Image (tube, grey):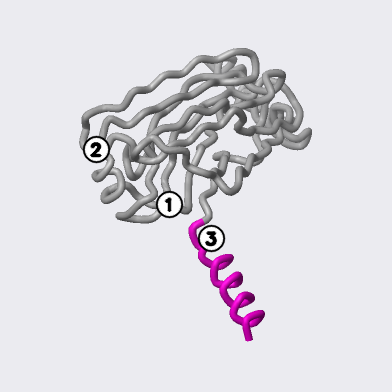
């Protein structure tokens, strides 16, 4: 009986932990692009509780990318739909970013009251987005390292899973030969008509 109770308790604890598992996901706007295309990679958090603790109050991460395939353009803070969930009362937040070859360090600290973060912050949202430009052919991975996350009281917030993403870059698309022949033929007709029109004057 004790073993059965212990097993049921362990199962219940496991389900409880899984239900509140917090994850960080990197989501690319496209999984395949051409050289010269722009791409956006969102960094999203999920598994927080709506209108209750835990909430996110601070983070400090390194965003990694393949510098041989992509050029870094800019960082966009917050969620495009929900707004910046670390700036719920429009007090602003402390934001800082620095970059090197293949990495970007991104830091943000909320200035909102801890209670407001717990009661008003969404359970899932985008922390920030990184905009890049594809410059070479290949398959490039995006990931986070040196990650630090804190709750509304700046206590360590444990993240259960980190999920990166990969984007494939192909060469610039060109018209098929049949399309080129059709285009050349149309141009020839236009030129021929122009010459005939001039000869009739």
SS class of the residue under badge 1?
A: loop
| 120 sits left or right of 199 in the view | left
Q: Is residue 117 above or below residue 9?
A: above
Image coordinates of residue 38 in percent, x first then y, are 56, 28
At x 54% / y 35%, what residue is drawn?
Answer: 41
Q: Nearer the viewer, residue 193 or 88?
A: 88
Label 1 belongs to which residue? Answer: 48
Q: What stretch of residues is rendered in magenta?
A: 1-20
Residue 17 got which mark? 3
Image coordinates of residue 89 in percent, x first then y, are 21, 37
- Local packing at callout 1 (Cα closer than 10 Å; few below 14, some 14-19, many 20+) is many
First of labels 3, 2 by sequence position: 3
At x 40% / y 33%, what residue is drawn?
Answer: 58
Q: Marks 1 and 3: in contact by CB < 8 Å?
A: no
In the displayed image of the protein, which residue is found farthest to the front?
2
SS class of the residue under badge 3?
A: helix
Q: Nearer the viewer, residue 109 or 78?
A: 109
Label 2 belongs to which residue? Answer: 113
Q: CA distance from mark 3 to mark 1?
A: 12 Å
């Amino acid at each position: 009986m004790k073993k059965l109770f212990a097993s049921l308790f362990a199962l219940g604890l496991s389900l409880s932990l899984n239900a509140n598992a917090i994850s960080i996901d990197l989501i690319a706007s496209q999984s395949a692009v051409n050289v010269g295309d722009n791409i956006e990679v969102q960094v999203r958090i999920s598994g927080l509780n709506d209108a209750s603790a835990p909430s996110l109050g601070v983070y400090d991460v390194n965003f990694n990318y393949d510098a041989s395939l992509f050029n870094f353009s800019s960082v966009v803070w917050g969620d495009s739909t929900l707004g910046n969930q670390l700036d719920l009362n429009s007090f602003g937040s402390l934001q800082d970013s620095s970059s090197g070859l293949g990495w970007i360090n991104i830091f943000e600290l909320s200035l909102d009251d801890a209670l407001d973060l717990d009661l008003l912050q969404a359970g899932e949202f985008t922390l920030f987005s990184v905009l890049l430009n594809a410059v070479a052919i290949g398959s490039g991975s995006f990931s986070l390292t040196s990650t630090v996350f804190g709750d509304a009281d700046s206590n360590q917030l444990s993240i259960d899973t980190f999920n990166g993403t990969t984007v494939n870059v192909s060469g610039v698309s060109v018209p098929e030969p049949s399309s080129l022949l059709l285009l050349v033929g149309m141009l020839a007709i236009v030129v021929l008509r122009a010459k005939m029109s001039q000869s009739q004057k």
